[in-house]
Image (tube, grey):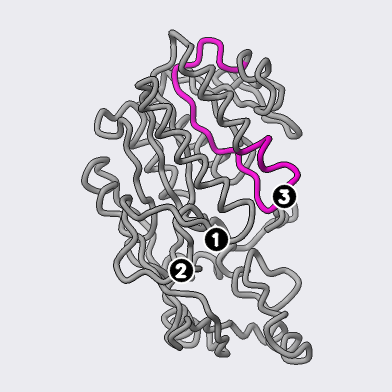
Amino acid sequence: MLILVTGATGKVGRHFIAGLLDDPRFSNTHIRALCHNRSFDETDRIETARGSIANRDDVANALVGVTHVVHLATCKETPSDVMDVAIKGLFWLLEEFRLSAAARQFILIGGDAAIGHFYYRNDAPLTEATRHQAYPGSYALSKVLEEVMLEQFGIQYGINWCCLRAPWIMEKDDFRYTLSFGDDVFGGPVWKTLVPEADARRYASDGTVPLLRDADGQPLKRNFVHVDDLVSAILAAIDNPRASQQLFNVCLDRPVDYGDVATHLARTRHLESVDIPSQYHSNWMDNAKAKDLLGWQPKYDLKMLIDLAWQYERSENDPRTVWYPG
């Protein structure tokens, strides 16, 4: 088995490759990392292909002899790049994959941006049957187009595809910094812009956390997944006949409730919280299909996500790095 991994040097890519190499089920599996601007350390089981997924020749060369593709590369809110990387890149990967005699399975990591994240009101849990509804911006549109293109290649050419749709992916101390009122905030909302400047400085200094409220005034519920749980879902999907031409939601069993976050941090770390009103909508991604067909189960819950993020201590050679805007 030879797996081509795009986005190999990113958060999910690094964890996926390490997890696969440690799994005895894949002891004879080799990895080819398709790298553009970054590099990956080669070993006897890992090789590197250089090039851009937006270039067909680079993709064709990278796919020689490949049996499986795990497509992790993405592009955030950068309109000048998103069509080349996310759409043209996926198209060339799928074109070369369908033409390859060695090809066996194509796995795409999708995102809850394809179904609107917390931008739209939903009156029922978000399942794999929920309609596509991108929120404003280029990233969400690209996630819709990726899922649709993948499904259509299955219809047109019968390829064996699987899409694992993930919400916001956490590792290490990521979750702690999603709640920072300082300049070190990870992702959005950017809390310091939602309160007076003096208050933001005080909240950042004191470790105060935001209690985000939804459009109905209730603590917002928002979906997350830990990178370890996403990796275990990818490994469960590889060569799984029940994954063939299937879309799966991969997330925590319950969405993160900002009220529960504030309560837990007040009890365990004596941190205060401050209400932040919003027009966002609470939602709940349903992961039952992945549990049923893949035999997958998330290990992380809200308390683990919080506690591990606050306990994590970074070494000097492990700086916080955000590889993309948005």
Position of residue 311 in the picture relative to residue 123 (left or right): right
Residue type pointed to by label 2: Tyr
Q: Which residues are magenta?
A: 62-86
Q: What is the CA distance from the residue labelled 2 to the residue labelled 1?
A: 8 Å
Q: Secondary structure at mark 1?
A: loop
Residue 263: percent from left, percent from top: 44, 85
Residue 230: percent from left, percent from top: 43, 47
Name the residue that disc number 3 marks. 78
Name the residue that disc number 2 marks. 120
- Could you classify mark 2 by the number of other residues whose Cα lies within 10 Å: few (under 14), some (14-19), or many (20 or more)? some
Position of residue 312 in the picture relative to residue 166 (left or right): right
Residue type pointed to by label 3: Thr
Residue 135 shows which numbered tag?
Answer: 1
Q: Nearer the viewer, residue 82 or 306?
A: 82
Decide which of tag 2 and tag 1 comes sooner along the chain: 2
Q: What is the CA distance from the residue labelled 2 to the residue labelled 3?
A: 23 Å
Q: Is residue 262 above or below residue 253?
A: below
Decide which of tag 2 and tag 3 comes sooner along the chain: 3
Q: Secondary structure at mark 2?
A: loop
- Who's the residue at 36% across and 25% down the image? 160
Question: Is residue 81 found inside the magenta-colored segment of the image?
Answer: yes
Do residues under tags 2 and 1 come within 8 Å of each other at their CB atoms? yes
Residue 174: percent from left, percent from top: 59, 62
- Who's the residue at 56% across and 50% down the image? 141
Residue type pointed to by label 1: Tyr
Residue 14: percent from left, percent from top: 57, 39
